[in-house]
Image (cartoon, rainbow, N blue to C red):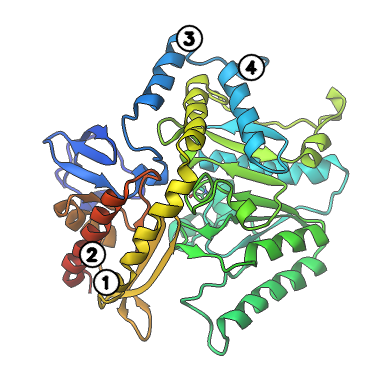
Amino acid sequence: NQLKSSVWHPNTQMKEWNSFDKITKGKGMWLIDSKGNKMLDGVASMWCNVWGHSNPELVRAITNQSKKLQHSSMFNLTNEPAEKLAENLVNISPGMHKVFFSDNGSTAMEIAIKLALQYWKNIGEKKKTKIATIENGYHGDTFGAMSVGYVPEFFGKFKEQLFSTIQFPVPNKYRIPKGFTFSDYQNYCIENIEKKISKNNNIAAFIMESGAQVAGGVIIYPKGFQRKISQLCKKYDVLFVLDEIATGLGRLGSMIQYEEQKSTPDIVAYGKMLTGGYLTMAATMTNKKIYDSYLGEFNDWKHLFHGHTYTGNPIAAAVANENLKMYKTKSLIKKIQKTSKVFEKFYQEISEIDIVGDIRHKGMLMGIELVTNRKKKTPIHPKKSINKIFFEEGKKQGIYLRTLGNIVMLVPPLAISEKELNLLLNGVIRTIKAARLKVI
Ligand SMILES: *Cc1c(COP(=O)(O)O)cnc(C)c1O
């Protein structure tokens, strides 16, 4: 291994890499490396970029705010951009009442977990301590987030330290258990949830991704699935906690995914797209019922013991405000719904490639599942990481890709043009064909 760099990269077998391309510039949907090579950003720089790179409005919001106030604590104080952002978020999130700021999606979910668990303590209900979740969900890499979003391949090494949850299967149309139709299986999944949560009076909260599981393999929920869980939570007095970090703010084609799903969370978390992909910030929101349970005399000790150094950072909040404003002024959601149709034009051509088992798409998200045997649906499993093979082949086509297990993920910046999305999809088809012989 000849790596001279001191950097340890995320989710990476460092031995596989001799060097990493150094990105020195970003312009629109393109990343440019130190040698001047251009790559189309097919993963929106880890699913967070909205308007492309070096957007003048967003850059201006950052520079203007950074000249006034760079950081001032939310402990005992407040600041204008964070106040405004909280108001903006409450305005777009039906049923939500207060916002707790943190730095990233994982911490936003840690806060959601703490808020839900302490709620029951605050109202004097001691039994409700368990958390229910969906199998293969993903909510971040910190310990609480790993516990509620357990992906065995990622987190198996820490199993002993994670708290236990009650997990329910997700209806995945591509992998329906033997003997079921898809519709029967959906009913079975919901009935199974009702059976368990009606019997166990110790469930504090049901936590799930909103609209789709992304890191768990792009499993898009069938219509009604999330709404029915939301209804069961109300019926059996379980808090409903939604993670919109990857799927809200436009990724699946609507601003607020839980609205589209006709579901009503008690707590919801946003992250990734919040600042347009420019600075690190996340938000955990709650309804009035949760918030009110935290009010009391100081020595009731009902307040939330949680806080980060950079909570409510004014520069991040300022760019988030500009970003949310642009969603409106540039009718981004409408644009996404239109651009999203470009994916559909490619279904046929992609599914004709013999290692493609399934295509799953909604809004600005597409997962292409690769298999060695289409009949048996055997996931491809080469010795070398699929990601590295696809990254290298993608680079030759001028596109930046990052796969997840045997799923090729297409998660472009939300404002990508139809022309660039065509480029990306044609590049992906060439990449899969070129990588084919290296992965089977
Ligand atoms: C990315 C992600 C997180 C974690 O966010 P980080 O900012 O990476 O910590 C949580 N939930 C979902 C659904 C995500 O996709």
**Identity of the amino acid at label 4?**
Thr
**Picture quadrant where residue 67 is located:** top left
Which structural element holds mark 4?
loop
Q: Quadrant of the C terminus?
A: bottom left
Distance between mark 3 and mark 2 Cα atoms: 47 Å
Residue 404 in view (yes/no)? no
Query: Earlier along the polypeptide chain: callout 4 or callout 2?
Result: 4
Distance between mark 4 and mark 2 Cα atoms: 50 Å
The answer to whether 312 is drawn above or below residue 169 in the figure is above
Q: Which residue is mark 4?
A: 78
**Identity of the amino acid at label 3?**
Lys
Name the residue: 53% across, 87% down: 178
User: Mark 1 or 2, which is nearer the eye?
Assistant: 1
The label shown at residue 365 is none
Which structural element holds mark 1?
helix
Q: Position of residue 311 (x, y in %)?
A: 57, 26
Q: Position of residue 164 (x, y in %)?
A: 64, 58
Which structural element holds mark 2?
helix
User: Mark 4 or 1, which is nearer the eye?
Assistant: 1
Q: Position of residue 345 (x, y in %)?
A: 32, 65
The label shown at residue 68 is 3
Query: Earlier along the polypeptide chain: callout 3 or callout 4?
Result: 3
**Identity of the amino acid at label 2?**
Ile
Query: Earlier along the polypeptide chain: callout 1 or callout 3?
Result: 3
The answer to whether 99 is drawn above or below residue 10 in the figure is above
Q: Position of residue 285 (x, y in %)?
A: 66, 39
The label shown at residue 429 is 2
Q: Is residue 179 left or right of residue 205?
A: left
User: Mark 1 or 3, which is nearer the eye?
Assistant: 1
Q: Which residue is mark 1?
A: 349
